[in-house]
Amino acid sequence: MKLGYNVVKRIKEKAKELNNGAVRLLVFLATRADDTGLAEGIYYKEFCIRTGMCNQSFYNAKSKLIELGFIKEFKNDNRDIDILLLNNVFQTKEDYKKGYINLNIELFQTEDFWSLTDNAMIMCLDFAKNSFAALNGSYRKNKADMYKDYEDIFKVSYGRIWSYLKALKKNFSIGAKNGIMYITPLKKVKEKAFISVASKRRSDWVQVVIRRLYAITDKKAVRELEALLSQYKPTADDQGKSIQEILFRCVKHSVDNLKRTEREVNCAYIHKLIRKELELELEMA
C-alpha cells in the first residue's frame, strides 16, 4: 500500500490530463499493489463501490492511465484484470530511498479523501508527500509561490486553489504567517489505520479466486480460505512456491466439472489438497 514519491511527482506533471477519475484509480490500484507494483484481480465494481463512480468511469480512467504510461494491463481472466503500476517498485533499499506515501493510514481510508475533486486529491497527495518527508512534519512554502505553482499545474484561478485548500482542512492544518504557508497533517492523518497489509492481501486474493472460478461461498468459508493462506504461506515460501497459486489450483480442482449453481467451496477438501501439494502428511481429525 505504497505510492512512490516519483509517481506523485509525475501525477503533478500530468495533472491537467488526470481528470474524470484517473488519479483516484491510480491511488486505488496502489492500495492493491504488491511491492513489484502488480495489482492482481482488479474488478471494476470494487473501484465503483470505493469511489462512488460509474462503471464507465473505471474504463475511461484505465485507458487514460495506460495512454499516459502510468500502468499496463494484463487480461488473465474474463472477469477481472491484472494491472501493473509502472515505476512503483519497492524491492531494494534503493527503491525505498526514493521515498513513498504510506497509503495504510486513516487519511486514505476516509470518505473525505475519496470524495475530493481530482485536483484537490492531487494536492492532497502532494501535501502528504511533502509534509511526511519534512524533518519537522510541516511543509512550508512561500504563499505566493505556492498559489502560483498550483495555478500553473491545474490551469485554474487563485479562488479555485483556495477552494481546494478549504476541502483539505479536514485532514491538514493549513495557515499562513509572514507570507509563509504551513501545511501540517492533523494527528489523525498520520495514525496507522487498523489494516494489516498481509491480511488485506489475503482477503483480496480470496475474492479474486472466488470470482474467477465462479465459486460459491459464505462468510465462514471465506474466513477459512484466508486462514489457509496464512497458515501455509511460510511452508510454501520455504519450498519456493506461491501459496496464492496453490490455493487457486486447489479451489479450481474442487469445483471443476460442477455446474455453475453447484460450485460450492469445500474448505476441508481444499485443505487436504493444499497439504498434498506441499507434500505434507494430513494431520486432521
Image (cartoon, rainbow, N blue to C red):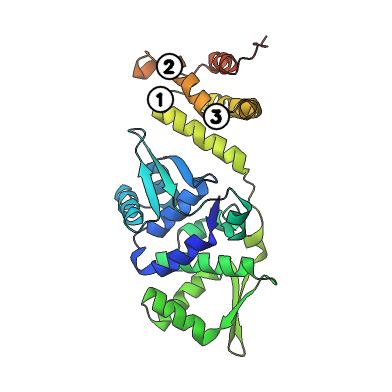
The answer to which of 240 and 261 lies nearer the viewer is 240
Give residue 242's mark: 3
Q: Residue at x 56, y 26 (%)?
A: 225
The percent position of residue 102, horizontal first and vertical second, equals 59, 55
Label 1 residue SS: loop
Hey, what amino acid is under mark 3? Ser
Q: Residue at x 41, y 69 (%)?
A: 13
Hey, what amino acid is under mark 2? Val
Q: Quadrant of residue 261?
A: top left
Characterize the local packing of mark 2: few (<14), some (14-19) or many (20 or more) Cα atoms within 10 angstroms.
many
Q: Does 261 sit above or below residue 23?
A: above
- Evaluate if marks 3 and 2 touch, with contact meaning CB atoms under 8 Å apart: no
Characterize the local packing of mark 3: few (<14), some (14-19) or many (20 or more) Cα atoms within 10 angstroms.
some
The percent position of residue 138, horizontal first and vertical second, equals 65, 73
Q: Nearer the viewer, mark 3 or mark 2?
A: 3
Label 3 residue SS: loop
Quadrant of the rendering where the C terminus is positioned: top right
Q: Residue at x 44, y 65 (%)?
A: 10
Hey, what amino acid is under mark 1? Leu
Label 2 residue SS: helix
- Among numbered discs 3 and 2, the one appearing first in the sequence: 3
Q: Residue at x 60, y 16 (%)?
A: 275
From the image, tell me which residue sits under label 1.
213
